[in-house]
Image (cartoon, helix red, strand yellow):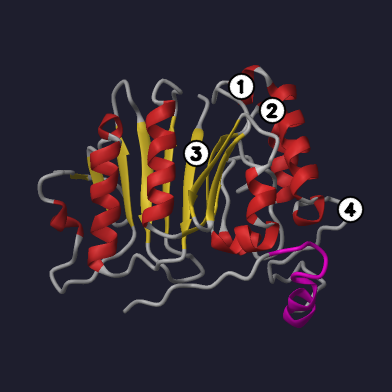
């Protein structure tokens, strides 16, 4: 079954109950087709009630990462992740059909502005792309981005993407707005939306067309920002990695051009 992945990497921690519940409310408002049916802090087992989302907050007033699922004809799953343990505040949604493409794109744009994203995207992994995805750490083969890899390189140009302030400052707003793509929109003073081709289905049905669109966009924006296998290095500390933490840090921003990510602190 084909997965389409929407990912929102925010500068907010989502640890404040008000921010966390705002993210839940926005989902319920803009994506009623994918209304969660079950939710949980480890597995989605508890019935979800959109009229009582305060149930997602602990009795002591704290919040934690929540996983949810929607079954039936509009099957979907997702999560609201709070910052901590190596994670940034982020929202993830996986769907299996393209019939609500415009609603998903509208949600992507609105959420990106509301939660001050570093970057957000909607993409899918074609069978032909899996080997590339394993190499560039595009959440391998799941077409989803993570801040831990973004600190070292942009894995690829997503099919639909919102570049937040860090990337607008790095690329330059005029360069982003002049990107040769199907659709380009300015969402705010430092936020730009780019969509490579008209339809989500293109990712699978017109793979070469999408890959060509990726290549053209990357050439325009600057290929020094995007993953290249011949320049890549292992940035994950492990017994198998010959690089030390200091050596990894010395490479960050020197091999590939990366922005300066500034995390928003809770008030």
Residue 146 in the image: x percent, y percent? Answer: 57, 56
| Residue depth check, mark 4 versus mark 1: number of the one nearer the observer | 1
Please tell me whether mark 2 or mark 4 is closer to you in this view.
Answer: 2
Q: In the rendered view, tell whether residue 108 sits above or below residue 116.
A: above
Determine the CA span between mark 3 and mark 2.
Answer: 16 Å
**Which residue is label 2 attached to?**
210
CA distance for labels 4 and 3: 27 Å
Residue assigned mark 3: 5
Q: For mark 2, does the 10 Å Cα neighbourhood hold few (<14), some (14 to 19), or many (20 or more) residues?
A: some
User: Of callouts 1 and 3, which one flags the residue occurring earlier in the amino acid sequence?
Assistant: 3
Q: Which mark identifies residue 202? A: 1
Q: In the rendered structure, which segment of residues is drawn in magenta? A: 245-258
Which residue is disc 4 drawn over?
A: 230
Judge whether residue 52 can be spotted in this image: yes
Residue displayed at 70% across by 70% down: 238
Q: What residue lies at 43% left-to-right and 60% top-to-bottom?
A: 116
Residue drawn at the location 44% of the way across and 35% of the way down: 105
- SS state under label 4: loop
Residue 137's spot in the image, x, y percent? 68, 51
Residue 91 visible in the displayed image: no
């Amino acid at each position: 079954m084909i997965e389409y992945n929407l990912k929102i990497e925010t500068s907010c921690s989502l640890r404040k109950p008000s921010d966390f519940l705002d993210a839940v409310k926005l989902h319920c408002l803009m994506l009623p087709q994918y209304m969660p049916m079950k939710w949980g802090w480890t597995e989605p087992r508890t019935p979800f009630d959109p009229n009582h989302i305060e149930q997602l907050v602990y009795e002591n007033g704290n919040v934690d990462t929540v996983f949810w699922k929607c079954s039936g004809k509009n099957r979907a799953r997702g999560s609201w992740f709070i910052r901590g343990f190596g994670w940034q505040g982020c929202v993830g949604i996986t769907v299996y059909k393209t019939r609500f493409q415009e609603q998903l794109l509208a949600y992507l744009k609105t959420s990106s502005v509301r939660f001050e994203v570093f970057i957000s995207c909607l993409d899918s992994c074609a069978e032909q792309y899996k080997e590339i995805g394993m190499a560039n750490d595009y959440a391998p083969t799941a077409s989803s981005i993570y801040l831990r890899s973004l600190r070292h390189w942009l894995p690829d140009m997503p099919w639909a993407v919102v570049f937040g302030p860090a990337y607008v400052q790095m690329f330059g707003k005029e360069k982003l707005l002049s990107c040769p793509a199907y659709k380009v929109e300015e969402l705010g003073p430092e936020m730009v939306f780019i969509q490579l081709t008209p339809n989500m289905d293109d990712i699978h049905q017109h793979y070469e067309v999408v890959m060509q669109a990726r290549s053209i966009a990357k050439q325009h924006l600057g290929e020094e920002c995007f993953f290249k296998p011949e320049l890549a290095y292992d940035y994950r500390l492990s017994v198998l990695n010959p690089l030390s933490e200091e050596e990894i840090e010395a490479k960050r921003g020197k091999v590939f051009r990366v922005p300066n990510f500034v995390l928003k602190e809770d008030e």
